[in-house]
Image (cartoon, coloured by chain):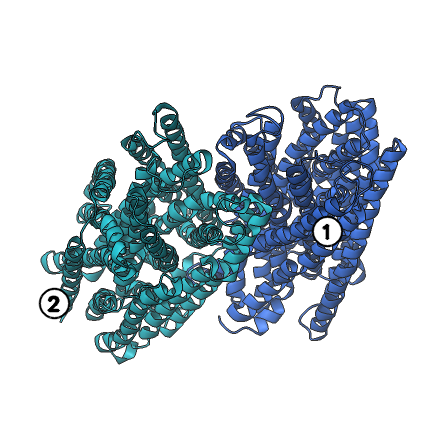
Chain colours: A blue, B cyan
Amino acid sequence: MELYLVIAIFVGSILALVFALIMAKRVMSFDEGTDRMKKISASIRSGANAYLKRQYTIVLIFFIVMFVILGAMAIFGLLTPYVPFAFITGGFFSGLSGFVGMKIATAANARTANACRTGLNKGLRVAFSAGSVMGFTVVGLGLLDISIWFTLLKFVFKLDAAGITAAMLTFGMGASSMALFARVGGGIFTKAADVGADLVGKVEAGIPEDDPRNPAVIADNVGDNVGDVAGMGADLYESYVGSVISCAALGVAAFSGNGDMQFKAMAIPMIMAALGILCSIIGTFFVRTGEKTEQKLLLKALSRGTNLAAILIALAAFPLIYFILGADHWTLYFAVLAGLIAGVLIGKSTEYFTSDTYKPTKKLASKSETGSATIIIGGLGLGMLSTALPIIIVGIAVLVAFFVSGGTLQAPQMGLYGIALAAVGMLSTLGITLATDAYGPVADNAGGIAEMSGLEPEVRERTDALDSLGNTTAATGKGFAIGSAALTALALIASYIDKVQTMSPDINYDSFSVMNPLVLIGLFIGACLPFVFAALTMDAVGRAAQSVVIEVRRQFKNIKGLMEGKADPDYAKCVDMCSRSSLKEMILPTVIAIIVPVIVGLVLGFYGVVGMLAGATASGFLMAIFMSNSGGAWDNAKKYIEAGNHGGKGSDQHKAAVVGDTVGDPFKDTSGPSINILIKLLSMVSIVFAALVVQFHILG
Amino acid sequence: MELYLVIAIFVGSILALVFALIMAKRVMSFDEGTDRMKKISASIRSGANAYLKRQYTIVLIFFIVMFVILGAMAIFGLLTPYVPFAFITGGFFSGLSGFVGMKIATAANARTANACRTGLNKGLRVAFSAGSVMGFTVVGLGLLDISIWFTLLKFVFKLDAAGITAAMLTFGMGASSMALFARVGGGIFTKAADVGADLVGKVEAGIPEDDPRNPAVIADNVGDNVGDVAGMGADLYESYVGSVISCAALGVAAFSGNGDMQFKAMAIPMIMAALGILCSIIGTFFVRTGEKTEQKLLLKALSRGTNLAAILIALAAFPLIYFILGADHWTLYFAVLAGLIAGVLIGKSTEYFTSDTYKPTKKLASKSETGSATIIIGGLGLGMLSTALPIIIVGIAVLVAFFVSGGTLQAPQMGLYGIALAAVGMLSTLGITLATDAYGPVADNAGGIAEMSGLEPEVRERTDALDSLGNTTAATGKGFAIGSAALTALALIASYIDKVQTMSPDINYDSFSVMNPLVLIGLFIGACLPFVFAALTMDAVGRAAQSVVIEVRRQFKNIKGLMEGKADPDYAKCVDMCSRSSLKEMILPTVIAIIVPVIVGLVLGFYGVVGMLAGATASGFLMAIFMSNSGGAWDNAKKYIEAGNHGGKGSDQHKAAVVGDTVGDPFKDTSGPSINILIKLLSMVSIVFAALVVQFHILG
C-alpha cells in the first residue's frame, strides 16, 4: 500500500511541474513588444539575475557553515547523519523556487505590457500564466522533494516513521533559512528602491512614478522581482513544505505504537497536497475576464478559479481521509475543513481591512484631510484592531480541529494532528492561490515598462487595473500565509515536545505550565522576538533607502541633461547600491533567528524553548497581521485618493497619504512577511538543536 | 505582634499624608504672580475641576452598576460580602489620589511660573513640592486604605489570611477600574487638546505654542492636569496598592498551613511600603539645584534624591525581612533587591532610548532630513527594538527573585512570593519617584502660563529647562510603572490560580501547559488585547482631536479680530469639547477590559483565563514599552531639532519631527500607560469572577 501512496504523491508533483512548464511555454509564446520594451525588460532581468546570483553566493557560505556545524553534531551523535544533507536540500529547493519565479516574472513583464496593448483579457492571461508558473513550481518542487526524501528514508535507508519525520523537519529548517534570507534580503531591496525612487523622484523632483528619468526606476522594478516574486517563492515553498512535514510528524506521534497507521497518517498531508495540485490546475482553467477594468469583475474572474479549487479539495478530502485512515478517524476531515474555511475567512478579514471598497480604508483615506500624522495614527490603529478577527478565527479553527479530531486535554496527540491537518487544508490549493498572488508584481512591472516605453495611456490603465487587483489578492494571500504560519508553528511546537520526549521520557505536553518561570521567561523573550525582528528589518530598509536617496540625488545633480530627458541616468548604479545594502542587512536578522533559540535553550532549557516558541507564535501572528494590514490599508488609501477622492493626485491629502504608504512599505513587504517565516524557523532550529539543549542546559 | 505591625503601617501612611500636607502648605505660601497669571491659572483650574466632576459622575454610575452586580454575586454565594464594598473603596481612593494631585498641580502652575521669575532653583522647589504632594498623597492614601481594610478584616471580622487577601484584591480591582477610566479619559482629553492645538494653531495658523490667541490653549493646559496629573495619580495609586496586595496574597499562599507566618508574610510588603515612605521623605530633602539650566545638572539634582531613597530602602529591607520572617527566609531580601535594581535598569534603558543625550534619539532626529516617513519608520523601529533590554532585565529579575526565594519548579509558591516582593521593591520609593515624575506637567503648565502672560523670555527658558527634564524623569517613571506592572501581573496570575484551587483542588500551578489548546487560545486572545486596546484608544484620540480641530478652525474663522489679538477666543468651548468626547470615548475600552476576561472564562474556562492573562502580560509589557519609548523619542527628537540641530525650528526637518511627535502623543500618553493598568485589571477581574467561571464554563 505505501508504495501506491508514494507514487500518487510523486505523480502529483510531476503534474504540477509539467503544468508549470506548459504555462511557461505559453508565456514565452507572446511577443515582448517594441525594442524599447525589450531593452527595459532586459535591464530588469539582468539586474534581478545579478542580484540573485550575489544573494545565493552569500547564502551558500551560510549553508556551508551550517552544514559543517550540523555535520559535527551528527558526528558527536547529536543528530542523525541525514540531517545535514536534508538541511542543504531544503535550502536549495527553496532558493530554486524563488529563482524560477523570478525568471518567469522577468520574462513576462514586457509580454504582459504588450498583451495589454491588445486588451485586458490577454494581459490578464499572460500575467496569470506567469503567476501560475511560480505557483505550480513551488508546490511541484515542494512535493517532489518530500516524495524523494520519503522514498529514500523509507525504502533505501529503511528508517521508521519517527526517524523519517526527524530528518524531514531538518529539510524544513533549510527551506526556512533560505526563505528568511530571500524574504528579508529581497524585502529590503525592493523597499529601499521603492522608497528611494519615491522620496527623491516623486516628492523632491516632482516627476511621475516609473518615469525613465528616475535613476532608481529600474532598481524599483528589479526589486519587485527579487522581493515580491523570488522572496515570496522561497517563502511559500517553506510554508508549504513546513505544513506538510510538521503534519506528517504529528501523524506519527498521534498513532504512536501502530506502524502501519503511522505511515498512513504521514501520507495523508502529502496526498492531500497532491490532490490540491489537481484541484488547483482545474481551477486555473476558470480564470478569464472581459474587457472592463472594474476591479469587481476582475476579482470575480480570479475568485472563480480559487473558489472552485477550494470546493474541489473540500470534496476530495473526505474520501481521502475516510478510505485511508478508516471510519474510526473520519472526523479528521472536519479539521481539514476548519483550516480551509479559516483560511478563506482570514483572507476576507484582510480584504475588509485593506481594500478601499470597504469602510476602514475609506475612513483611513479621509484622515488625510488633517495631515500625515492623523493618517499614520489611523493606519497603525487600523492594523492593530484588525488582529482581533483573525485571532478569533484561528482560535475557533484550532479548537474545532483539536476536538473533532478526538483530542482531549489528557491525550492531545490526535488533536494536534488535527491542527496540523487544518494548516495543510489551508495551503492545499496553494498552486492557484499563489498564482493569483504572484501575478501582481508581474502586472506592476508591466505598468512600469508601459510608462517607461511611452505606450498609450489605455495600456497603463489596463496594467493599473491588473496591478490594483494584485494588491487585493496579495492581501488575501497574506491572510493564508499568516494563518497557516500560526497553525504550522503550533504543530512544530508539538513536534519539538515529541522530540524532547524521546530523550527525556518524563516530559510530555502537560509539562509546560505558563507558571513555570522558565516557560514564562521564555514566553516573554519569544514574544519580544517579532518586535526586535520587525525593528531590525525596518531599520535596514531605512538605512538602505537612505543610501539610494543619496545616490539618486547625486545623479540628478551631476548628470547634465537628465531632467530634460537628453541624458540617461545610471540605472545599474542604483541596482548595485540596493543589492549591496540589502545583502549586508539581511544577515543579522537571519542569524538572530537561528542563534536565539539555541541560546535560550542552553540557558533556560527546553522549558524556556517551549515558552519562547509559544510567545513568538502568538506575538508574531499579531505583528504580522498588524504590519501587513496597516501597510495594505495605507497603500490602498493612497490609491483611493489618487482615484480622485479627497483632493486627488497632487493635493495635500495625497501627500499625507504618500507618507502613510511609505511607512507601510517596509511594514507590508519586508517586516510583516518575514515574521511568518521567523516563527517557523525558530521552531525548526529548536527541533534540530534539541539534543544539544537536552544534554547541555543551565536551568530547568 | 501583629498589632505592632499594623500600627507601623498606619504610622507610615499618616507620615506620608502629613508630609504631603506640609508640602502643599509650602506650595500655597508662594505668590501666584500678576493678575493675568492668576486669571489664566484660574481658567485652567476651573476647566480641570469641571472635567473631573463630570468624569467622576460617569464613573460613579459604572461603580454603582458594578456594586449591584458584585452584590448580586455575593448574595448567590459567589463572593464574600466584603467584596462589593472593597471594590467601591478602591475606586474612591484611586479617584481621590488623582483629584488631590490635580488640585495641587493647578494651584502650583502659576506659582512655579512666578517663582521662575526669581530663579531656576526657586521654580524647581515649587514644582517639585507640588509633585511631592501628589507622590506622598498616593502612597499615603494607598497604605492608609490597606491598613484600614486589614484592621477591619482581621480584627473586626476576624477573617483568616486567605479571606483577607481575597477581599483586598477586590479593593485592587476597584482601584484599577478607576485608574483605567482616569488614564484613558484623561489621556484622550490631553492628547485631543494637544493635537488639536498643534495642528490648527502651530501648523495651519503658524502661531507659536501656548499662544493666547489659540482657542485650544487652555484646553491643552487643562489636559496636562487631568491626564498627566490626575490620570497618573489614579494609575500609580493602583500600581502601588496592586503590588502590595498581590504580594500579600502570595505571601499567604507561600506559607500555607502556618497562620502566624502567613500574617508576617502578608505584612512584609506593607511594612516595606511604610519604610519606603520614610526613605522617600528623606530623599526629598536632597533635591536642589543651582541656577544653570543645563539638563545634566538638573537631572543630577533630582537623581540625588531618588538614588538616596533607593539606597536607604535597600539597606532597610534587609533587617526587615531578616527579623520578621526569620533566618530561614532571609534570602527573600535578594528578591527585593532584584526588583529595585531591575527598576533602576529599566529606567536607564528607557532614558537611553528616549533622551536626546544618547545616540538613538539623535539618530532619530537625523532621520528628519529625509522627511516625515523616515522619522516615523525610525521611531517605530526604535520603540520596537527598545523592548529587548527591559524583557531581558525583567526576565533576569524574575528568575533571580524566584530562585533566591527558594522557589522550585515543583513547589513554586515561595518563588512567586519572591517575584511579588520584587515588584514591591521596585515601587517602594514611589513617593519620591512619583514626585519627580508629577512635577513635569506642573512645569509644562508654568511654561504655558509664562507664555500667555507675556513674561520675560528668561522665565520661559527656565520653565522649559524644568519641563524638558520632566520628559526624562517621566520616561524613567514609566520604566518603573511598566516593570512593576509586569511583575504585579505575574503575581496576580498566581493569585488567580490559588483562587481557582480553593474551588477545584486538583488544579495547581502545573496545570496550565501552553500545549493545552484552551490555554493556547487564551494566550492568543490575551496577546491580542493590548493591540486592540491600543487601537481603540488611539482611534479615540484621533476622533476627539478631529472635533477639536474643527472647533478651533471655526473660531479662527468666525471670531473677528482674534488673530490680531483684539478679541478673546472661546476657551471654555474647547474645554467642553474635549471633555465631552473624552468622556464618551473612555467607556468602551474600559468596559472591554472588564467583560473580556469574563467571556473568555465562561467559554474557555479557567485554562483559557490563565492563558489569556499570560498572553496579555507578555504582549502588554511589550506594547507599553514600545509605545512609550517611540513616543518619548519622537518628542525629544523634536525638542533636539528645536534646540537648533538639523535646521532648527521652522525648518522642513522640524515639520517632519512635529509629525513624529504628534503620532507619538497618543502612544506615550494615552495608549502606552493605559496598557499597564489593563494587564492588571484583567487579572483582578478574573480573580473576582473566578467563582462564576469555575461553576459555569463551557470548555475545559
Label 2 environment density (alpha carbons within 10 Å; few <14, some 14–19, many ≥20): few
Chain under numbered label 2: B
Instruction: Please state which of the two labelled residues, at mark 1 or mark 2, is closer to the viewer.
Output: 1
Q: Secondary structure at mark 2?
A: helix
Percent coordinates x, y for residue B177 in the rendering = 29, 45
Helix, strand or loop at disc 1?
Answer: helix
Q: Could you tell me if residue B522 is visible in this image?
A: yes
Q: Nearer the viewer, residue B266 or B102?
A: B102
Q: Residue at x 57, y 36 (%)?
A: A634
Q: Looking at the image, which is closer to me, B499 or A600?
A: A600
Q: Amino acid at mark 1?
A: Cys
User: In the picture shown, does residue B235 fall above or below A696?
Assistant: above
Contact? badges 1 and 2 (CB < 8 Å):
no
What x and y, as percent, mark residue B315? 28, 76
| Nearer to us in this view, A394 or A564 | A564
Give the residue number, with chain letter if any, for mark 1: A578
Q: On screen, A535 above or below A375?
A: below
> What amino acid is labelled 2 in the image?
Leu
Residue A271, located in which quarter of the rendered image? top right
* Residue at 36% across, 47% down: B674
Question: Quarter of the image holding residue A82?
Answer: bottom right
Describe residue B432's horizontal placement relative to residue A515 as left or right.
left
Relative to B520, does residue B5 appear above or below in the rendering?
below
> In this orientation, does residue A677 appear?
no
Q: CA distance from mark 1 to mark 2?
A: 73 Å
Chain for numbered disc 1 = A
Which residue is label 2 attached to?
B3
